[in-house]
Image (cartoon, grey):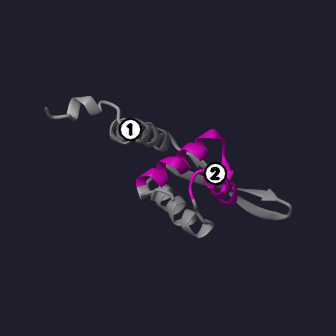
């Protein structure tokens, strides 16, 4: 059983992976698969959306005689990632308060 990942969370996860180090699509997919079920065909539209929003930029680098496209986070992408992280923390705390029965006594009626 798993939980669905929406576009905003996927954007945040991709930005976080790329923020660690410039990288390419296949490597991003492999890293994300540690947490979510994602294919390269799902990832590339996300990368294009992040580029369109000026959160990522690309450059090509030769690898074994072929060009490989690398992604790097822009300053605007870093700002967006910080906002995503703050929103995630707030969301996580709210979900934890219910799912982990934190503060359940506050909601009990007598």
Q: Position of residue 50 (x, y in %)?
A: 48, 55
Q: Which residue is mark 1?
A: 96
Report the predominant secondary structure element of the magenta stretch. Answer: helix
Answer whether residue 85 is visible to the viewer in this image: yes
Is 103 located above or below residue 21 in the figure? above
103 displayed left or right of 84: left
Contact, CB < 8 Å: mark 2 with mark 1?
no
Tell which residue pokes out farthest to the front in this image: 110
* Residue lying at 75% horizontally and 63% vertically, measured from the top left: 67
Is 53 located above or below residue 94 in the figure? below
Q: Which residue is mark 2?
A: 34
Inspect the magenta stretch and tell me whether residue 30 lies in it: yes
Tell which residue pokes out farthest to the bottom in this image: 41
Q: Which residues are magenta?
A: 8-36
Which element is circle 1 on? Answer: helix
| Sequence-first disc among 2 and 1 | 2
Answer whether residue 54 is visible to the viewer in this image: no
* Residue lying at 56% horizontally and 52% vertically, measured from the top left: 57
* Residue lying at 51% horizontally and 61% vertically, measured from the top left: 46
Q: Residues within 10 Å of mark 1 (few under 14, many from 20)?
A: few
64 displayed left or right of 70: right
């Amino acid at each position: 059983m798993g939980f669905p990942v929406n576009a905003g969370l996927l954007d945040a996860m991709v930005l976080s992976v790329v923020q660690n180090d410039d990288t390419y699509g296949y490597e991003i997919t492999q890293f994300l698969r540690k947490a979510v079920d994602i294919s390269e065909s799902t990832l590339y539209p996300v990368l294009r959306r992040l580029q369109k929003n000026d959160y990522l930029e690309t450059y090509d680098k030769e690898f074994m005689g072929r060009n490989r496209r690398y992604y790097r986070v822009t300053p605007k992408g870093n700002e967006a990632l910080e906002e995503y992280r703050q929103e995630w923390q707030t969301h996580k705390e709210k979900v934890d308060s219910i799912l982990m029965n934190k503060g359940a006594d506050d909601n009990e009626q007598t």
